Image (cartoon, rainbow, N blue to C red):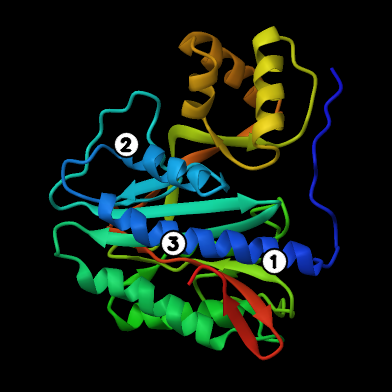
Amino acid sequence: MILFIKFPRENAEMTEPEIESFREAGKMASKIREESKALIMVGESLLDVAETIEKMITDEGGNPAFPVNISINDIAAHYTPGFGSEETLGETDLVKVDMGIEINGGLSDTAYTIDLGSQNEKLVEASEKALEKAIESIRPGVPVGEIGGIIEETIKGYGYNPISNLSGHMIKSNELHAGVEIPNIRTNDSYQLKEGEIFAVEPFATTGQGHVEDLDMVEIFSIYSPAKVRMRQSRKIIDHVINNYGMLPFAERWIRKEFKSKLLVSAALKELLENHFIRGYPVLREVSRGLVSQKEHTILITADGCEVLTK
């Protein structure tokens, strides 16, 4: 089987049309993010919320850049409801919604937190203020480790901890995580921000120790390293993934809608994981079971600061 995959370009400056695609993706994400907040209500189905937001994206003419994440309480990231999930939002849930949009290779990534129990407003404010302060300090020449220090100091000023092993990330055309990270704590990373670069900045604040661990649960995957596969069903799934999602993350529930047999899909994904054709993104939980809040914007670094694409 010959595979044709559109890989991101290495070390190439983005053209103005590419940047405009990022702006369009950011503007659309901002609109849908704000509209989606009305969906976060006690008793609402997580699956309905995720699929409604994803449909809002496609109805507007975009594509989900990754499955909508709905991470609750001590779950920090990478949770998307599975096929047929019956989970609902509880009265005191702290709900993080992380969503992204792809338009012509341009990507956006944005997130917010809603406190359904109105008991953790200060924790929510900590991640929001940390993002605000980080954005104020961003400009060409600033080391990413310094940005992490600003995030850390802001969150600790509220009496909470930043999550040390989660970070923001550079974004390039068709590439959601492009190598360079913006940490949520002060580090010695001396990489200096450059005009024209695009980053997702996403502070996480927690009542816990400030570290996340992988759970066994995995609902999100992406292509990692194309290799030979044996099962016919695996080859069909790979063709579908390449044609519809490329190198961007996808959900098992998306595959289950196309391929009805749960057993065959599970067996195919297992083979693809074992052959390192795809990689999984385990659900991430705060190690001490602390509550977690998140706020995220996608920004374009300009000559004298930055442009918030998802504002």
10 Å neighbourhood of mark 2: few (<14), some, or many (≥20)? some
Give, as a three-letter code, the residue at label 1: Glu
* Label 1 vs 3, first from the N-terminus: 1
Tag 3 residue: 31
10 Å neighbourhood of mark 3: few (<14), some, or many (≥20)? some
Residue 166, can we see it? no
- Residue 204 drawn at (x, y percent): 41, 65
User: Between marks 1 and 3, how big is the CA–CA gap?
Assistant: 17 Å
- Residue 32 drawn at (x, y percent): 42, 56
For the residue pair 291 and 90, the one nearer the viewer reads as 90
Residue depicted at 37% across the width and 79% down the height: 129
Position of 82 compared to 2: left or right?
A: left
Q: Circles 1 and 3: CB distance less than 8 Å?
A: no
Q: Quadrant of residue 246?
A: top right
- Residue 228 drawn at (x, y percent): 80, 19
Q: Is residue 216 above or below residue 102?
A: above
Give, as a three-letter code, the residue at label 2: Asp
Give, as a three-letter code, the residue at label 3: Lys
